[in-house]
Image (cartoon, coloured by chain):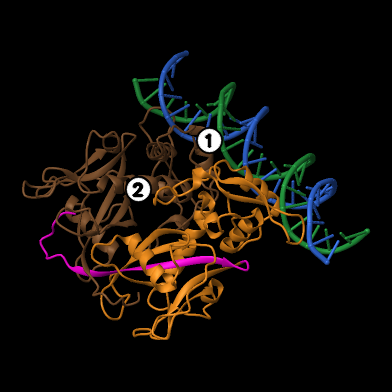
Chain colours: A orange, B brown, C blue, D green
DNA sequence: GCAAAAGTGTTAATCGTACACCCATGC
DNA sequence: GCATGGGTGTACGATTAACACTTTTGC
C-alpha cells in the first residue's frame, strides 16, 4: 500500500466465473462460445470487465446473470483467486479475478445469434483434453476443481449444488461427482445427518420414485448464508474424502 | 472475459503482504509505519503498486524485499485473495491482491528517517483492538490468520516458520502460536514424525539447552518447494487442530 | 542427585469402514 | 412377490487423546 517512486500502472480488470453443477451424476462447467477474437469460436469461462463503482463479487454475479439470462445468482458465489496480469491475454496485460459458483443445475438462456451462447459442459471432457479452453482458463478450472473438492470436506456447500430441498442420495451424488469417488450410501447417510449444524429434516418425503421414499432435507439455519454474506459455517467434524 | 459494451475501467493494482512469524511463542505480523497520507503515522501491511511487466507474486516479493531490506523472500509466499476496488482507499478505487508470507523470524532493516519502518508486531495486539491498522488491513489480516491456521492442518507449511533445521518442539511452538492452543508434546511428536513425506531426520542434535538434546529435522524432499513453484504437498493424514 | 525437556509405551474412547439386515415403496 | 433404493445395526481395525514412564542432558 506504500507509494513507490515509479508511476503506478493501471490495469484492466476482469472477473471470470467457474460455474459448476452436477447433471446426471457428472460434474459440469458453464462455458461460453466466444464470438470475437482472440479465441473466436473457442470455449471460455463467462466473465467480463469490472466496471467503475463495482465490487468484485458484484461484477462476477452481474456477468453471470448477463451471460446466462438467469434471474438471480443461483447458488454460492465466492472469490477463487487472481491471475495475471502477465502473459494471459494476447491483447495485453489483463488482471482477472476468478470466482467459483456452486449451483444447482439451472437452465441457460438460448441467446440470439449476436450473443455469446452459454451452456453446460462435462468437466471430464476438458480434463481429458478433448475440449480446450481459451486463455489460461484450463488452469483456472483446475484450481476451481481443487477448491470445490476441499470445500465439500469442511463446509456445508455441497448443498449449494442441490435445490432448496433434497434427499441424502442427491447430496451424495454431488459428493461423488465432485470428488470422483463412490461413497457408501449407508455410511454417508449417517455422516451427513449426524453432522451437527449441517442438515435439517423438513419432515417431507419424496414420492413416485423407485424404492422406498426418501426424507427431504434442507440446509440447517446455522449453515445458511445470512444477509448477502456467504456462509462461513464449518463442518465439524469434516466429511473426509477418501485419500488415495 | 467477454467484452461488455461499456468501456472497461482500468484500476491501479497493489499487492499487500501479510508476513507472519513466531517470536517467543507468539504470532507476529510484519507492519510498516506510514509516512504519508492517508493514515499517515498509522500502521499498515507492507505493499505497493504492481508495475508494468510484473506478476502478482513477483510484485509482492519485491515489495517485501524493498520494505524490509531482507535479501530474498525468506519463507513461503502465496496469494491470499483480492480486495476492492470499492471503498477501501479514500483516494479512490484501488484493487489490492493480498499475499500471505509464512517465514522464520528474520531481522528487519532499520530504515532511515525517509523510509517506512517495518517491524514485527504481536498479532494479539491487533486482535484485541489495542493496535489499529490502516485501510481494510484488519480484515485482510483476519483472512490471513484463518488461511494460516488451515494451512498448518493439511500442508507441511508449518515448517516455513522454522529455519532450515528445527526440533519437533520448535515446530510444535509454531502450531501452538498459530492455532492458539496447547498441544500434547508427546502426541505431537509422534504425529509429526509419523506423517509420511513431512519430516526428515538430519541425524544432528541440539546441544547446550536445558534438558535432553533434541533431534534436528528438516522438511522432507517431497514437501519442499521445487524450482520456484511453491510446495503443493499435502499432509495425509492431516494434523488436526483441536476443534472447540 | 535434581530439574528439565525429549522421546516411548500403553490404554480407553472415538471414528471410519465394511457389510448384514430390515423398511417402504412401485410394479 | 419382487426389485429398488432408503435407512439402521454392528463388528473390527485405525486413530486420537490422556498420561505413566524412561532417557539424556545441564547444573
Q: Regarding mark 2 in the picture, which secondary structure is present there?
A: helix
Nearest to the observer: residue A209 or residue B31: A209
Label 1 marks a residue whose chain is B
**B4 lies above or below A164:** below
Nearest to the observer: residue B188 or residue B149: B149
Residue at 47 percent across and 75 percent down: it is A109
Asked whether residue B213 is drawn in magenta, I would say: no
Q: Is residue B34 visible?
A: yes
Nearest to the observer: residue B168 or residue A236: A236
From the top left corner, tell me how far across and down residue A21 is, in percent.
Answer: 53, 65
From the top left corner, tell me how far across and down residue C17 is, in percent.
Answer: 69, 51
Dot 2 crowding, Cα within 10 Å, few <14, some 14–19, many 20+: some
Residue that label 1 marks: B187
From the top left corner, tell me how far across and down residue A228 is, in percent.
Answer: 39, 52
Region rendered in magenta: A1-25
**Dot placed on the residue nearer the N-terminal end, 1 or 2:** 2
Q: In the picture provided, is A10 more to the left or to the right than B226?
A: left
Dot 1 crowding, Cα within 10 Å, few <14, some 14–19, many 20+: few
Q: In the picture provided, is B85 more to the left or to the right than A74?
A: left
Residue that label 2 marks: B143
Amino acid at each position: 500500500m506504500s507509494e513507490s517512486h515509479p508511476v503506478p500502472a493501471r490495469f484492466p480488470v476482469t472477473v471470470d466465473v467457474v460455474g459448476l453443477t452436477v447433471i446426471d451424476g457428472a460434474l459440469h462447467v458453464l462455458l461460453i462460445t466466444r464470438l470475437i477474437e482472440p479465441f473466436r469460436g473457442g470455449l471460455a469461462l463467462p466473465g467480463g470487465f469490472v466496471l467503475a463503482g463495482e465490487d468484485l463479487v458484484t461484477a462476477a454475479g452481474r456477468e453471470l446473470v448477463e451471460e446466462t439470462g438467469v434471474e438471480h445468482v443461483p447458488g454460492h458465489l465466492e472469490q477463487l483467486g487472481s491471475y495475471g496480469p502477465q502473459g494471459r491475454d494476447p491483447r495485453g496485460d489483463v488482471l482477472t479475478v476468478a470466482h467459483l459458483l456452486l449451483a444447482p443445475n439451472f437452465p441457460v438462456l438460448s441467446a440470439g445469434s449476436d450473443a455469446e451462447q452459454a451452456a453446460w459442459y462435462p468437466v471430464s471432457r476438458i480434463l481429458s483434453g478433448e475440449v480446450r479452453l481459451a486463455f489460461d482458463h484450463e488452469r483456472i478450472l483446475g484450481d476451481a476443481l481443487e477448491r470445490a473438492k476441499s470445500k465439500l470436506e469442511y463446509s456445508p456447500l455441497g448443498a449449494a449444488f442441490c435445490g432448496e430441498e433434497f434427499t441424502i442420495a442427491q447430496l451424495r451424488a454431488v459428493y461423488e461427482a465432485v470428488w470422483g469417488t463412490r461413497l457408501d450410501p449407508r455410511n454417508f447417510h449417517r455422516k451427513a445427518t449426524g453432522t451437527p449444524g449441517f442438515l435439517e429434516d423438513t419432515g417431507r418425503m419424496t414420492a413416485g420414485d423407485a424404492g422406498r421414499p426418501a426424507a427431504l432435507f434442507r440446509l440447517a439455519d446455522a449453515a445458511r448464508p445470512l444477509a448477502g454474506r456467504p456462509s462461513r459455517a464449518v463442518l465439524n467434524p469434516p466429511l473426509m474424502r477418501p485419500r488415495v
